[in-house]
Image (cartoon, grey):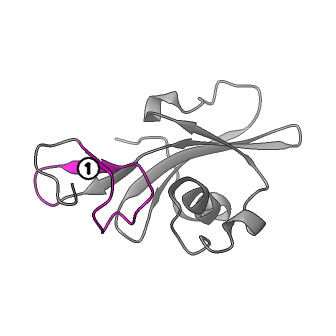
Amino acid sequence: MSTGFKGGTSSAPHRECVQCRVFGTGEMKDTCEQECSYFNLIKVKDLDKLPQPMQNFPLVHCKERDANDCWFYYSYSVNNTEKEVHVVETLECPVGAGGWRTWTGGADPGSRGSWHCLILSCAGV
């Protein structure tokens, strides 16, 4: 079943900037302020809160994986000359067999950070 989300090259121009601005991680985290202020960032709570393609301007949904095998979801669009990126504010991270966990950002997800668990037993809590 297709989620309608693109990954890889179609999303690549924004991936690193989305990752550093929302989660404080990724290859551009040290230069994020200088290099990644070219779009308006809007955080949303859930995947279903991302804008949908029914709007009058082009919209691309993206699904990307970070270095910790966590997924993050976002959409980007250009309305006239304004670039807008909507990002689901939690990462979706594997915990091994039996479930997933979500991460709200801040500390590295491999460390003991602020996890929000979708299952009862999450490492890192």
Identify the image quadrant of residue 37: bottom right
Identify which residue is drawn at 15% across, 43% down: 119
- Residue 82, picture quadrant: top right
Residue 31 % position (x, y)? 69, 73
Q: Residue at x 72, y 64 (%)?
A: 33
52 relative to 67 in the view: left or right = right
Q: Nearer the viewer, residue 8 or 81?
A: 81
Residue 111 percent location from the top left of the image:
30, 68
Above or below residue 10? Residue 67 is below
Regarding residue 11, the answer to whether it shows in the image is: no
Range shown magenta: 96-117
Q: For this view, does 33 lie left or right of residue 61? A: right
SS at mark 1 in the image: strand
Q: Amino acid at mark 1?
A: Arg
Percent position (x, y) of residue 38? 79, 55
Q: Is residue 8 on the magenta stretch?
A: no
- The residue indicated by pointer 1 is 101
Query: Can residue 51 be spotted in the picture?
Result: yes
Quarter of the figure that contains the C terminus: bottom left
Q: Quadrant of the N terminus?
A: top left
State whether residue 31 is above or below residue 81.
below
Towards the viewer: 115 or 88 = 115
Q: Is residue 116 magenta?
A: yes
Please tell me whether the stretch drawn in magenta is mainly helix, strand or loop. Answer: loop
Residue 108, x across and y down, in percent: 39, 66
Q: On the image, which quarter does residue 93 sit in?
A: bottom left
Q: Residue at x 52, y 51 (%)?
A: 6
Residue positioned 19% across, 58% down in the render: 95
